[in-house]
Amino acid sequence: MIKYIKKKKLDLIYYGDFFTHELSNKVYDRLIKNIDWNFDQIHIFGKKRVLKRRIAWYGDEDKIYKYSGTIKVPLKWSKTLYLIKNIIENHINYSFNSVLLNEYGSGQEGMGWHSDDEKELGPSPTIASLSLGAARDFYFRSNKDHSVVKLHLENGSLLIMQGETQHFWKHSLPKRLKLAEGRINLTFRKIN
């Protein structure tokens, strides 16, 4: 299933079944075991906070990423991550040089409203977001009129955020307190 969403400078392509559930589950298990996961410390409103979710940053050797007062030096591509990157690149005809992985252990963990608009990503970044594990709701909110677009990200789905999306919209992954299953999100990026 492919869904195109273009409205008010929101430019998304959603592939609901980019990976099969069987493949998604195998990749999920491999990433849980083999990724060098860490708990990040970020700066919000002048205070240091340790994130509840685990993260990892992989990419080309010199692709450093800075966000929320944190500097991420990339780990070398694993075979699995490099293979996933190539599959996505060939499918959408766009190249990436890094990936940020977020592991949400359950619905107790989420992500607040934000935009991926750091200067390292360039003026109109294309970000490919692969979801593995538990299906979760994902929201976009317009910076101008605060209208909201809701997507339900399935296990094995791929969401492409492109164009001016990061400049005019924020996105979030709300908590779902009754959800016990975990989720991994891989956001492939191009650092300039």
Image (spheres, rainbow, N blue to C red):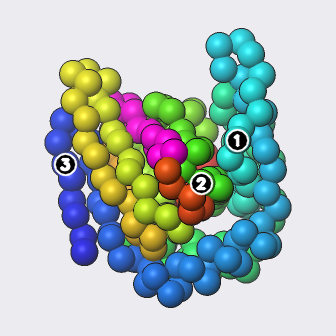
Q: Relative to residue 54, is residue 113 depicted above or below?
A: above
Magenta range is 165-177
Query: What's the distance in space between the residues labelled 3 and 2, CA to CA?
Result: 31 Å
Which residue appears at 25% of the width and 75% of the height? 1
Query: Cβ–Cβ below 8 Å for labels 2 and 1?
Result: no
Identity of the residue drawn at 36% across and 77% down: 17
Q: Which residue is mark 1?
A: 52
* Badge 2 amino acid: Ser
Q: Residue 169: within the magenta?
A: yes
The location of residue 109, given as percent across then percent down, is 59, 44
163 vs 74, left or right, is left
The residue under label 3 is 6
Mark 2 or 1, which is nearer the eye? 2
Residue labelled with disc 2: 106
Closer to the eye: label 3 or 2: 2
Q: Amino acid at mark 1?
A: Lys
Q: Circle 3 — which element? A: strand
Nearer-N-terminus badge (2/1): 1
Q: Secondary structure at mark 1?
A: strand
Location of residue 3 with respect to 21 vertically, above or below: above
Q: Is residue 81 left or right of residue 22?
A: right
* Residue 189 appears in the picture as rendered: no
Q: Position of residue 168 (x, y in %)?
A: 32, 30
Name which residue type carries label 3.
Lys
Left or right for 183, reference 137: right
The quadrant holding residue 158 is bottom left
Residue found at the far front of this picture: 178
